[in-house]
Image (tube, grey):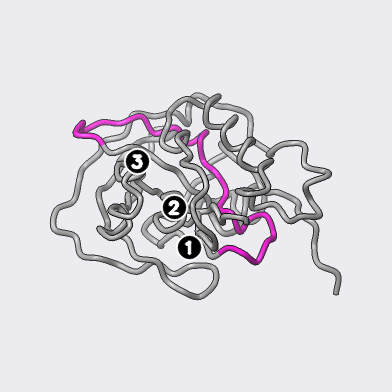
Amino acid sequence: MRIVLSYIFIGLFIGLFCTADLVNAQTFYGTTDLKEFREGRDKELRNRDESPLKEEDFPNYKGLNYFEVDEKYRVTAKFEKTNDEKILLIPTSSGKSKTYVKYGILTFKLDGKQYNLNVYHSDKETREAYPEYKDLLFIPFKDLTNGNESYGGGRYLYILDTDKTEVILDLNLASNPSCAYGSDWFSCPIPPKDNHLKVEIKAGEKSYNYTKAEK
């Protein structure tokens, strides 16, 4: 069976939406090690039990497309946790909504300009169902490359929960949601307007040219 991996808490937290039972815990999500993350992503895409690739695209899959690694996109961000946030619903590509909690705000600078990204956590029920991902935080975002060099629906970042007030935010780790690969198995959270960056983030995964259905 294929597990729909596009929101990691593999199945319910971030949009790795399970249409089947969880097969394997993906430990590379949340890492700041670029090599580890990209190797994990590639392995995931090649595994038919986990991959969001359409069946007809497996024979021609040669790896994901990336922007050149740029150290300017690996920044130190201020991490301010938010208190007493209520449950909120984030719309998805299927028209349904997924439940999250706003967990904090990241503040960082690129080329001298300041930007903010909201950080989300899964709800209590999901954390209890998938305790191996209880410390994984979700950052869906859009930027000015979407629809051109990168996937039009936005991209995702993941960090691990911490008590520190500063974290490493590496935008080179930006990854596509599973619905970026053409399959209709997936329902991916749409980045909220508060996480629309008015800047080109030329880092991370680019768009993927999947096989289009014949009309």
Q: Are marks 2 and 1 in contact (CB under 8 Å)?
A: yes
In primary-sequence order, the first of circles 3 and 1 is 3
Quarter occupied by residue 39: top right
Q: Residue at x 47, y 61 (%)?
A: 189
In primary-sequence order, the first of circles 2 and 3 is 3
Give how far apart the Cα atoms at labels 2 and 1 are. Answer: 7 Å
Quick check: 33 above or below 174?
above
Looking at the rendered image, the disc whose residue lies closer to the viewer, 3 or 1, is 1
Q: Which mark is residue 190?
A: 1
Identify the residue position indicated by label 3 in the image.
114
Residue 142 x/y as whole percent: 49, 53
Which residue type does callout 1 highlight?
Ile
Looking at the rendered image, the disc whose residue lies closer to the viewer, 2 or 3, is 2
Residue 13 x/y as whole percent: 39, 55
Q: Residue at x 43, y 54 (%)?
A: 14
Considering the numbered disc 1 on the image, is that residue within a helix, a strand or a loop? loop
Q: Which residues are magenta?
A: 162-186
Mark 3 Cα shell of 10 Å, populated few (<14), some (14-19), many (≥20):
few
Quadrant location of the C terminus in the rendered image: bottom right
Q: Nearer the viewer, residue 66 or 179?
A: 179
